[in-house]
Amino acid sequence: MRDTAAIEQIKSKYRRLAPLMDERMRRQWAASEAEAYGWGGVSAVSSAIGMSRVTVEKGSMELAARAKNPRAAVSARIRQPGGGRKTLSETDPELFAALEQLIDPMTRGDPTSSLRWTCLSTTHLADALTRQGHALSPRSVGRLLNEAHYSLQGNRKTQEGGTHPDRNAQFEHINTTVDEFQARGQPVISVDAKKKELIGQFKNGGREWRPQGAPEEVKIHDFVDKELGKVTPYGVYDLSQNEGWVSVGIDHDTAQFAVQAIGRWWKKMGAPRYRYAKQLLITADGGGSNSSRCRLWKVALQALAVNLQMPIHVCHFPPGTSKWNKIEHRMFCHMTQNWRGRPLVSHEVIIKLIGNTRTEEGLRIRAELDRGTYPTGIKISNAALAALNIMHDAFHGDWNYVLSPKKKQK
């Protein structure tokens, strides 16, 4: 694998030295850099400065010859002005226009051409140009693309699709509510369920340091282990204390499981920390087990409010904005980083890896296995929903509401 930093350094040095060197000095300098780079140096230098491998190798031959006979006279003649092979753009003035027509990011070439539905590799582009009468190799296509400041690039996630008209207003409402709770010393948590994880000797993304040539061996196919199955980590993140709790469930990710995780956090971490708390604020996504439309979520929260004898305030993020939920980039990302490249071979391993997640900012996480069963398909009747002591906010009551521990007045 190429050293990106070393290649950038070669580029930087070449830009500074190239105006001071003649043609021979440039190729011999390039050969010297390739030798210093080590294995793959010729390719790395060629890619960095746009010089062909043949030219770099010619410089290497000249340096080797010079080393054998250091006293040999160096000819002052380099090349006559205008000498050497003509560039492709000089011999074929229409070549670059034809290439741009094929790679144009808007039209993608002729709409009727099959190339539009083909990966635009240098080989395919060279074949298409050759059929148009511009005979050249894939390597020459790559050189032309580099000269035109094209590069290989992946997709970038920037488009979020349709947004709710009250999206920004809801963000402001959440921020204001969080600030108010924190100013009064009341607990504020961000909750969410992480994606299900396979338990067993399965490949896990990322890399970790191991003895060279001794990677962790895992199964080829990711078929679920019938005994170990999958787990769902449900997280509770304390926005004020930079602390987290994760219930690792072995059954279904339901609203009951989510609320049970919140209850466990309160018992093990919340209550000792907030001895004089009078209310709790939860910020959550708009979907999943803690969905704003889930009746079972509200029923389970009502039961938790009664158990804690504390009103529970809930603010949901607008649809399609789950990445702004604090737990995603303050806790879950660090958990994933901590277990990168390690197979999650057992429940104990995943609990240990989560519990030992640390950051320089002082993040601490506790984790516990939840062996409870949480059946799916539970229906909440209209009567049961109407019996809830729930107060909907004047602004988007479907996203912002309070569940009271007191019985609803008839």
Image (spheres, rainbow, N blue to C red):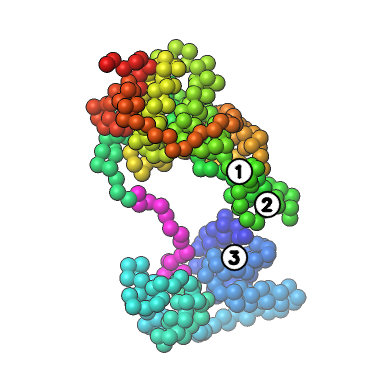
Please report the residue visible at 32 percent of the width from the left and 50 percent of the height from the top: 161
What residue does disc 3 label?
A: 44
Q: Earlier in the sequence, mark 2 or mark 1?
A: 2
- Report the residue marked by disc 1: 229
For the record, the magenta segment spans 145-160
Closer to the camera, 252 or 367?
Answer: 252
Looking at the rendered structure, the kind of residue marked 1 is Gly
Residue 81 position in % (x across, y down): 48, 83
Q: Position of residue 72 (x, y in %)?
A: 71, 79
Q: CA distance from mark 1 to mark 3?
A: 45 Å
Quadrant in which the N terminus appears: bottom right
Q: Main secondary structure of the magenta part?
A: loop
Q: Label 2's element?
A: loop
> Looking at the image, is mark 2 or mark 1 nearer the viewer?
1
Q: Which mark is residue 218?
A: 2
Query: Does 292 sit left or right of 215 as displayed?
Result: left
Circles 2 and 3: CB distance less than 8 Å? no
Q: Quadrant of the C terminus?
A: top left
Side (left or right) of 338 relative to 333: right
Residue occupying image coordinates x 65% and y 66%: 40
Residue at disc 1, secondary structure: loop
